[in-house]
Image (spheres, grey):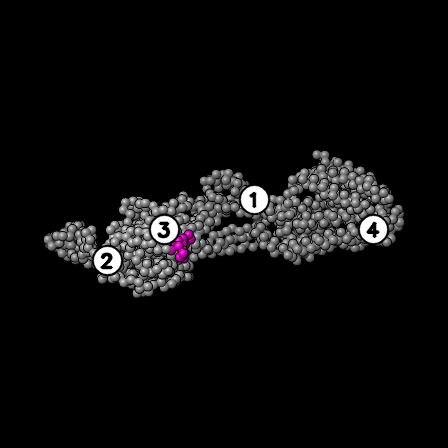
Amino acid sequence: MSMPSNQVRRRLFITLLVGLFLFAGLLARLGYVQLVEGNWLNDKARDLWTRDIPFEGKRGRILDRKGEVLAYNISSPSVLAIPAQIEDPAKTARELAHILMAPEQNIYRQITKKQLIVRLQPYGRKISNERAQSILERRLPGIVVAEDNRRHYPQGSLAAHILGFAGIDNQGLAGLELVYDERLSGTRGHVSFGANAKGERLPGGVDRYTPPEDGMDLVLTLDKNIQAIVEREMDQAMAQHDPENVLAIAMDPDTGEILGMGSRPTFRPDNFRNVDPEVYNRNLPIWRTYEPGSTFKIITLAAALEENKVNMKEAFHDPGYVKVGGARLRCWKGGGHGSQTFLEVVENSCNPGFVNLGQRLGKEKLFEYIRKFGFGQKTGIDLNGEAKGILFKPKQVGPVELATTAFGQGVSVTPIQQVTAVAAAVNGGELMEPYLNKAWKDPETGEVLEKTKPNVKRQVVSEETSKKVRYALESVVARGTGRRAFIDGYRVGGKTGTAQKVGPDGRYLKNNHIVSFIGVAPSDDPELVVYVAVDNPKGVQFGGVVAAPIVRNIMYDSLRYMGVEKRKKQIPPEKIPTSQPIVTVPDLIGENVSRIRNSLYDTPLQVSGKGEVVINQAPKPGERVEKGTPIRIYLGDK
Amino acid sequence: MPKPRNAPDVVIIASILALLTIGVIMVYSASAAYSYDKFGDSFFYAKRQMLFAALGVFLMLLISRIDPELFYRWAKPSLWICFALLALVLVPGVGMVRGGARSWLGIGAFSIQPSEFMKLAVILFLAQYLTSNARENQTLTKGIVIPLSIAGAAFALIMMQPDLGTGTVLMGTAFVLIFAAGARLKYLLGLCLLGVAGFAGLVLAAPYRIQRITAFLDPWQDPLGAGYQVIQSLFAIGPGGLMGLGLGMSRQKHLYLPEPHTDFIFSILAEELGFLGAGTAIILFAVLVWRGLRVAIRVPDMFMALIATGVTAMIIIQAVINIGVVTGSFPVTGITLPFLSYGGSSLTLTLMAVGLLLNLSRYTK
């Protein structure tokens, strides 16, 4: 028997305190986990307790302005696995591999993952309905077929750069599919049910169905028919001139709506994986920057007119060059244009004449207008990858820079900037923001949910100036360098451009030009601006020869399609040896064929059918055609 | 030996019965899904737990009436018997493997864990040894080296099973006894450093222990691997909140937590009965600490004081580690929660140990 010493008692007391302290600590920790972290843990745990089977919302369609479908979805189910529910992984893998024509090992590895839900990549994604059906028929435990969609572009490569494309998860990856991804894609829904760790349904667990929300339909400003015309002409140009690339833009100058736009080389959106990313990433009409060349003279002209620095009837003498700050800037025409009015300066695209206009404006004013017309900044079109272009900084501008800028050299601009600037020059002076998104529609009801209003950025020049510019441009086509864009009755105005390209060493490349033409029609009330640029065409490298006919073709078909009235009054085209006079087609219907042969000896006829009397003819009576155009007559008996 | 002065401590009896009640209910609730899945009988574990609780309480009351003099005499023989059993359990074919450790002796359901009995034997022996050499407890040899060597030998045998949890409790209890008996603080400090080094060595020897430690520091690093158990436990405790989800409403017991009725019973308790329920259990353990050490301080005899200390220390160390593990405060160690976790051998033994405590509580001043 021995009494515990006081020291022992003291130590027991310490032990007691330590023990109580430990439990107090545990109580605090428990309180922290339950009362402070509780909600956070609960949220994290919810994912564990419920199994979600996703239901994809349908991605909105993309339509042209008339409702033609440019992109839509095809039902294309995907296979999901819930590994915990799979009873016989080997057998399941074998059967799935057979149906999906996939390597068995790949499937086995995926369905045995330690994961709640596995998407079978890539063999189980976007499969055909037939395969989905045969998977469903096997009733494989733990294998679910979920509704999914594949993006389809029914028009092939039409407007490829504008539409862009969506990836495997229906996520927008490029073009408008990317820009408007959020609104196109809608929200994903799912069915969730409570489950134990085996993935089996928990007793009393409530199934919740959260329906997916479909994306909205996007209506574009594009017109499928105009786009098709643009695409056709670009293909034609590629075949005819074998250039490095071609680009074209068609815009409504009053609103800034893009009616057609594209470039070559192009691609098919549903085949983007097999295409060089450079092709689909470079949307040339908004991405490419280069010296515009003479099309830029429209800006100089508009600025000079607005500032009252020039009268179009004023005389100007061009000796073939102009001396500026010791440098000798040549006109494109050897020997020069001699004496001419300023209207003729524009018609002839005479460089010394525009240098003179630039000098009259001075560098402050000229550059002020260049900026006001939108150069040096993005136009704000609703696409990614737009470039800003480069302008001289005010400090760098000496007499030479001023002079070259006046005729379109030494500045770097994008095609879309040129189109919007010229549109502003001819539409009454308003700089518009170009756009592609015309409206959003409810996919079910077709009801218009939201409409884009044209956005006027600023008034750049007056209606008065605009009118003069339109007249000058029409004159360029009727009598000057733009003759090949002439269309009788549509009053086409325009301007050629031949821009030198800057090589990697910073010098101009030899015999390598971007030739372009910008056309406007009809000149009394422009409804269409078309710009075409052909990069390094083989053969003649001159905008008036290569690009003008392309613009003419696009204009002609588009204006007819748009139902634009032919005008009676127009600047009469100057007769040049290569162009035939325009005549009105006579009315031959009902005439006797032998009489026609006698009276119309100078008109070539093509005869179809048999008989004595003309029952129909093409072109129709009253149409205006070049003299010498054959008329087809259809014969029959009365 | 003096005569008993009073009746056994009713506070201890009351808190033990409260803990046992909570335990049986929670074993039922936690194991119903699991045991139905495994045995087709949702009461399988609950029935056995009640049986062992009854047996344990019977043994507890029996032991509380034995003359403490006998404990003094039994101390050495019971230690040797336990050493023999511990050696026997390591023999393949004799000891049974459950949960990765060869720690069971016996046939089928009638099996015991010698390591559980060893804890009690070490307490008895150290109490006896440290009392008989009370004057030399300040020396290094008799105060520290010899008692520690005995405990260390038992620890080594337990670690060969291996069972880090039980081994840790045993060494912790031995340390408390040596401390209480009056060993010099500078020796104890050295011992602590040695213990830390030894523990580090053990951890480094078995890679899974490293994983468990890193998992405890940041369980979200590897939520499906090393951090799995801690996260699953926190997913039970956290959502429980103040009031809990209600009895039987645990979601985590549905096969997310491995064997929710043993090591992780506290998580299910916290999930179903909330902070109020789980906090009550912690407070009941705290009451045991207080009443147990109160007995130790008030008994008139050094041997009695040390036994009361050892029993209390054994129970609270185990409880602290278990609750610490499931709340993510300590590294994961396989250890049961006294009175609450399912487990016949451990429950019976713990109740027998409480019997010792009750016995001694009759002698308090």
Q: Any magenta on residue A202?
A: no
Indicate the amino acid at tag 2.
Gln
Indicate the amino acid at tag 1.
Lys
Q: Which circle marks residue A290 in the picture?
A: 3
Mark earlier in primary sequence (1, 2): 1
Q: Nearer the viewer, mark 1 or mark 2?
A: 2
- The residue located at (81%, 39%) in the rendering is B146
Which residues lie in the magenta part? Answer: A378-397
Q: Which circle marks residue A114 in the picture?
A: 1
Residue receiving disc 4: A9
Task: Pinpoint the chain carrying mark 3.
Answer: A
Q: Nearer the viewer, mark 3 or mark 2?
A: 2
Q: Residue furthest top?
A: B92
Relative to B287, is A167 on the left or the right?
A: left
Mark earlier in primary sequence (3, 2): 3
Relative to B271, is A484 on the left or the right?
A: left
